Image (cartoon, rainbow, N blue to C red):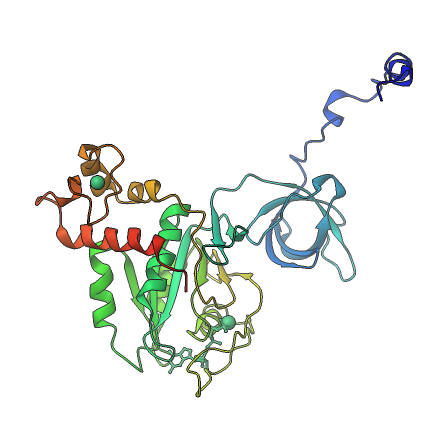
């Protein structure tokens, strides 16, 4: 109803310009900056670092943020009582733009995208060598997600006391994926060194030992772990939400709940090759619309000068996009 009332309102509404312009859209440039470490039903736990040291602050979202999501790893501007003292509640006033976003679709038919973590640098794909057995299809899908999100993948093969890592290490070498092998009775210095000063997120099946690693990396982490079910050979989905923990040598490690699959509906296959610089350079000679799949008749990736193992590995990644997520 475009009424005379609107006209009236337009002319008669007092135009107040009494406040300085900058206050119209507040800038929180000098507010405290926090890193979101847990998200639980509208309550956010933040790590706030400043001259006074590091403190843990509980906060809620300011109403002005509306439906803007806040996820683990986000860097936020926080106002109000940011002392972190018991029973205080600060407000998240703004979310900094995200450097990276690791997404997952529950499965390829599920249109809902979930952000696992923001601002991560590294995706640690945790795979047990046994108990539960490794599933290369899941590793491939996690790699695709890492390449798509611009995260450096690191394959962490756990439970080396139960089975050999040789075959899996060899399988991922052509892709240039770095690998670390761990066992509960061995040192984890190599893993520790690779995580230093980075934000790393661990993903993998339930029961592969993610929380076990976190407990060793972060002495006071106290993450609950439980044994793999002897009957089904599966983990018990012990961890139920993502949590970021500060590493003693600097950096953050994000422990996440075990996944059954890694849905990739959000990934555009055309962009996947961009993560493989050498192959992408060769693919400029492909015919228009070439998908680079093995059955493409004139794909430039069939050039003998390319490393065939690398081409094959890339095509396996590509194929994993069209396989069911499970
Ligand atoms: N033999 C052996 N067992 C391990 C090793 N690392 C972890 N485990 C065991 O594997 C089981 C599962 O470990 P968790 O750390 O709970 O696994 P998770 O990946 O966090 O599992 P979810 O939280 O369910 O996703 C526990 O019983 C651990 O003691 C290892 O190197 N060798
Ligand atoms: Mg766990
Ligand atoms: Zn091609």
Count of numbered labels shown in the rendering: 0
Measured from the top left, where is residue 281 in percent x and y?
21, 36
Name the residue located 23 percent from the left edge and 47 percent from the top edge: 293
Q: For this view, does 22 lie left or right of residue 184?
A: right
Does the image show residue 44? yes
Q: Nearer the viewer, residue 230 or 64?
A: 230
Measured from the top left, where is residue 9 in percent x and y?
89, 17
Q: Which of 145 and 288 is in front in this view?
A: 288
Instruction: Tell which quarter ligand 3 is in.
Output: top left
Question: Is 246 rendered above or below residue 129?
Answer: above
Q: For this view, does 306 lie left or right of residue 313?
A: left
Please state, as top left, top right, bottom left or bottom right, where the C terminus lies in the image. bottom left
Question: Is 37 rendered above or below residue 30?
Answer: below
**Farthest-out residue, left:** 304
Q: Write down the quadrant of residue 192 in the picture.
A: bottom left
**Farthest-out residue, top:** 11
Q: Write down the quadrant of residue 187 in the picture.
A: bottom left
Measured from the top left, where is residue 67 in percent x and y?
68, 44
Please state, as top left, top right, bottom left or bottom right, where the N terminus lies in the image. top right
Does the image show residue 176? no
Q: For this view, does 170 lie left or right of residue 221?
A: left
Q: Nearer the viewer, residue 124 or 275?
A: 275
Question: Is 216 rendered above or below residue 139?
Answer: below
**Farthest-out residue, bottom:** 231
Q: Nearer the viewer, residue 260 or 24?
A: 260
Name the residue located 29 percent from the left edge and 54 percent from the top edge: 319
Question: Is 203 rendered above or below residue 122?
Answer: below
Name the residue located 48 percent from the left edge and 42 percent from the top edge: 99
Measured from the top left, where is residue 60 in percent x and y?
72, 51
């Amino acid at each position: 109803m475009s009424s005379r009332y609107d006209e009236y309102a337009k002319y008669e509404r007092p135009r107040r310009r009494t406040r300085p312009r900058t206050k119209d859209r507040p800038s929180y440039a000098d507010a405290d900056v926090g890193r979101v470490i847990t998200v639980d039903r509208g309550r956010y736990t933040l790590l706030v670092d400043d001259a006074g040291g590091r403190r843990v602050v509980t906060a809620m979202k300011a109403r002005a943020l509306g439906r803007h999501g806040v996820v683990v790893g986000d860097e936020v501007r926080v106002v109000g009582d940011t002392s972190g003292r018991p029973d205080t509640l600060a407000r998240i006033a703004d979310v900094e733009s995200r450097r990276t976003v690791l997404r997952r679709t529950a499965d390829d038919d599920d249109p809902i995208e979930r952000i696992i973590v923001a601002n991560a640098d590294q995706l640690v794909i945790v795979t047990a060598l046994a108990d539960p057995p490794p599933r290369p299809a899941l590793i491939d899908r996690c790699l695709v997600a890492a390449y798509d999100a611009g995260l450096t993948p690191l394959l962490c093969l756990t439970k080396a006391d139960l089975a050999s890592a040789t075959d899996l290490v060899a399988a991922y070498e052509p892709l240039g994926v770095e690998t670390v092998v761990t066992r509960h009775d061995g040192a984890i210095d190599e893993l520790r060194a690779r995580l230093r000063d980075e934000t790393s997120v661990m993903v993998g099946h339930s029961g592969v030992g993610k929380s076990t690693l976190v407990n060793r990396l972060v002495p006071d982490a106290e993450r609950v772990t439980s044994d793999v079910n002897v009957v089904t050979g599966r983990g018990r989905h012990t961890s139920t939400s993502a949590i970021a923990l500060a590493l003693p040598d600097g950096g953050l490690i994000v422990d996440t709940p075990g996944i059954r699959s890694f849905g990739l509906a959000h990934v555009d296959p055309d962009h996947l090759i961009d993560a493989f610089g050498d192959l992408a350079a060769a693919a400029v000679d492909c015919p228009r619309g070439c998908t680079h799949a093995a059955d493409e008749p004139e794909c430039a990736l069939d050039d003998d000068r390319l490393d065939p193992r690398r081409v094959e590995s890339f095509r396996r990644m590509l194929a994993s996009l069209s396989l069911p997520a499970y």
